[in-house]
Amino acid sequence: MLLPDLYWKLGRLRFDVPNHDDAMLKVILTAMTTIDNASVAADTRAFIDWMRSRDDLQGGRSAAIGWCMSGQYVLGTVGHHPEEFVAGATLHGVGMATDAPDSPHGLAGKVKAELYCAFAETDHTVPDTVLPALRTAFNAAKVTYEIETFPGTVHGFQFPKRRGDYHAGAAEAAWTKIFALFTCKLGGTA
């Protein structure tokens, strides 16, 4: 397992998201603007090359998972590196389908990974146009995917420490789907 620090170029940043105040929120939002799909794709290439250089990791299959802002990077990663990833999962992902020329959903035609995308029923960070745009792109590209929206949930429903947002039933259902997908595509047991 590899857990990349997307903000490595900024130095050591650590956020206490469940207990953030306005000052921390400003730092979080500023940090988010320092990375984009192209830089994450380049960093991912470096991660892949490093993993492939290790004798103990040769021949393995890879999957990617991301929450919130990293949902777009999961979709971008499996699109930019289709030969490397067999599965991807996003949970309340943002920025996955936008009007920007580098919108991750524009890579659907390159995706070979199977995808699972879990969304909250109410999420102010995911416009109503996103899920239809994802379905259209995935269907046109014949991507194997599941998009699931959990009733009674809000953005952040997956995190137990998010005050008032955590939804145990939806979180468990999403984890069950993710473990099943990753077990199927990566091998092993759940």
Image: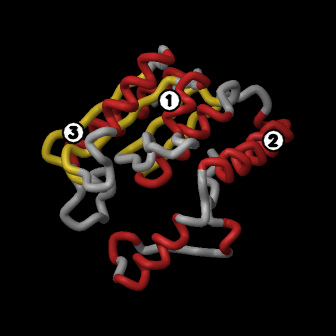
Q: Residue at x 58, y 34 (%)?
A: 63
Q: Which residue is mark 2?
A: 49
**Rendered-image quadrant of the C terminus:** top left
Q: Is residue 179 left or right of residue 155?
A: right
Residue closest to the eye, 39 or 78: 39
Q: How is the image coloured?
A: secondary structure
Going 49% across and 26% down the picture, which residue do you hit? 183
Say which amino acid is labelled 3. Answer: Phe
- In which quarter of the view is residue 155 placed? bottom left
In front of the other: label 1 or label 3? 3
Query: Residue at the spot x=43%, y=40% of the render?
Result: 97
Tell me if mark 2 has few (under 14), some (14-19) or many (20+) residues whose alpha carbon lies within 10 angstroms of its own: few
Distance from the alpha carbon under mark 1 to that under mark 2: 22 Å
> Which numbered mark, 1 or 2, is in the foreground of this view?
2
Q: Which amino acid, by three-letter code, is at mark 1?
A: Phe
**Badge 1 vs badge 2, beta-carbon distance below 8 Å:** no
- Residue reaching furthest to the left: 152
Q: Earlier in the sequence, mark 1 or mark 3?
A: 3
Q: Is residue 150 above or below residue 83?
A: below
Q: Which residue is mark 3?
A: 150
**What residue does disc 1 label?**
182
Q: Secondary structure at mark 1?
A: helix
In the rendering, at what x and y percent does residue 61 appear?
A: 66, 28
Q: Position of residue 188 (x, y in %)?
A: 55, 26
Identify the residue shown where x is 34% and y is 33%: 176
Q: Position of residue 96 (x, y in %)?
A: 45, 42
Give amino acid for label 2: Asp
